Image (spheres, rainbow, N blue to C red):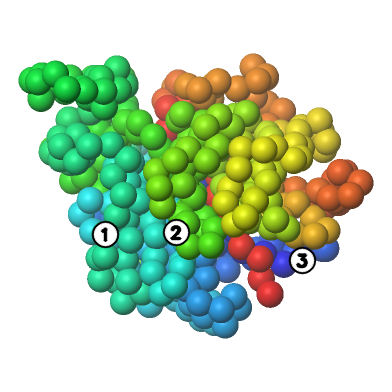
Amino acid sequence: MKLLVTIADTLDPGFGRIAAVDLERESAEIVMEWVPPPGLRASGKGFTGLAWAGAPGKSDLIACAHAGLCRIDPATWTVRGVLHQPCMNDLHHVAVHDGRLLVANTGLDRVDVFEASGRFVGGWDLSPAWIAAERLSGRNPSRESWAGALRRGWELQSSVLDDEPFAGDLGERALPSLPFPTRKTRHFVHPNHITMLEGRPLVTRFIDCSVQDLADWSLAIPQTPGHPHDGEVHGGCFWITCTAGLIVAYAIENGRLTSREVERIDVPERTGRSGWCRGLIVTDRLIVVALTAVQYLPPFGWPDRDLSKTETSILAIDRHALKLAARVDFRQFGQLPKLYGMIELP
Amino acid sequence: MSPADPDQAEGPVDIKISAQGDRRALEAVYLELREIAAQKGLKVEYRLSLSKPEDRAKS
């Protein structure tokens, strides 16, 4: 199997990179590098989600940069166009469906929808619009203040959010004077990944460990066994990665996602390898997962305090034997490389 | 390798620039240098060293 993966690097100026991976040869090479214009560039932030604009292998690619979508010609590996709105911040994924682009605008806790032409269509706010407005203007509410604003109920209350500055150098990257697209923001939902299931957009919500069906707002999976990242539909199941190292499959019944778990794979247990799990590809034969070395103890926890065992690699797990079938090491692709989205090359 | 006579340099030459706490400014210098180097058929390798491990943790 051949695939494409997006790579960022914590210590680089914010290049958008894509690598082509050959699992059989256990090799990878960088096929493109994009330097964002200054207004869209954020240190250490590169491409994240990746999707085909149309037919796989026969269309352009759409890659999420930190504050815009890049339309890429895979024949020449050049960026044909950049779709940017000043409310974009830390985009994590794009799903292409029925001529529309559904974008996880993670830094503002929104899902935005565009026509393929780039024209804005609409979107889903995952918190009230006035909170988004406050955040756009530079406020960084605390988690408590944000949660309180959601449950105001029927009692009239003053519309005041607190402001909790980030500590240390993060504070400098979150200054209200910085333009929103490149400013560090506190995330409250952190929508990671969008998957279309029979016209229903499913979004993985990292912070509260759930999967939401945006067609009716229901939490199709109210509690995932870890913080969810990517989600893919394959073989009648919805498969997710949980960042600490789980891959979980949930049943799809009558075209709707259910919370009935049908398979769970513990990546470190099965492969002896661990890392922050994001990208996922599921086929009849393989489960392919992208790991990133953990550089610090994440605020939402990590099962093992010894982070030195974690690695940046792509693992292919044989679905039947549940054993490691291939591994591609990404350590050579930068100082502190991070792997995000993967798509299969037909 | 940094040869004694820079005019004779054939291999890589190390250039160290202190960010002085302004990573973005350092990156802008690197990107500009990279562009100039590319025009001359040269390549610039960029390695950012953080002074404190806790800074690296928060990146």
The residue tagged with tag 1: helix, strand or loop? strand
Q: Earlier in the sequence, mark 3 or mark 1?
A: 3
Give residue A193's position: percent from left, percent from top.
Answer: 49, 49
Residue for point 44% across, 59% down: A94
Choose top left, top right, bottom left or bottom right for residue A344. Answer: bottom right
Look at label 1 and name its amino acid: Gly
Separation of residues labelled 3 and 1 (CA atoms)? 36 Å
- Residue A154: mark in rendering: none
Q: Give the side of residue A47 with respect to residue A128, left or right.
A: right
Give residue A16's position: percent from left, percent from top.
Answer: 45, 58
Separation of residues labelled 1 and 2 (CA atoms)? 14 Å
Judge whether A85 appears above or below A313 on screen: below
Q: Residue furthest front?
A: A254
Which image quadrant: the C terminus of chain A?
bottom right
Instruction: Report whether residue A192 is seen.
Output: no
Judge whether B11 appears above or below A314 on screen: below
Q: Give the side of residue A144 with respect to residue A44, left or right.
A: left
Mark 2: few, some, or many residues within 10 Å (few <14, many ≥20)?
many
Q: Which residue is mark 2?
A: A94
Give residue A301's position: percent from left, percent from top.
Answer: 55, 20
Look at label 2 and name its amino acid: Val
Q: Earlier in the sequence, mark 2 or mark 3?
A: 3
Q: Which residue is mark 1?
A: A122
Q: Give the side of residue A50 with respect to residue A240, left or right.
A: left
Give residue A165's position: percent from left, percent from top.
Answer: 24, 22
- Residue A1: mark in rendering: 3
Residue for point 77% across, 66% down: A1
The residue tagged with tag 3: helix, strand or loop? loop
Separation of residues labelled 2 and 3 (CA atoms)? 23 Å
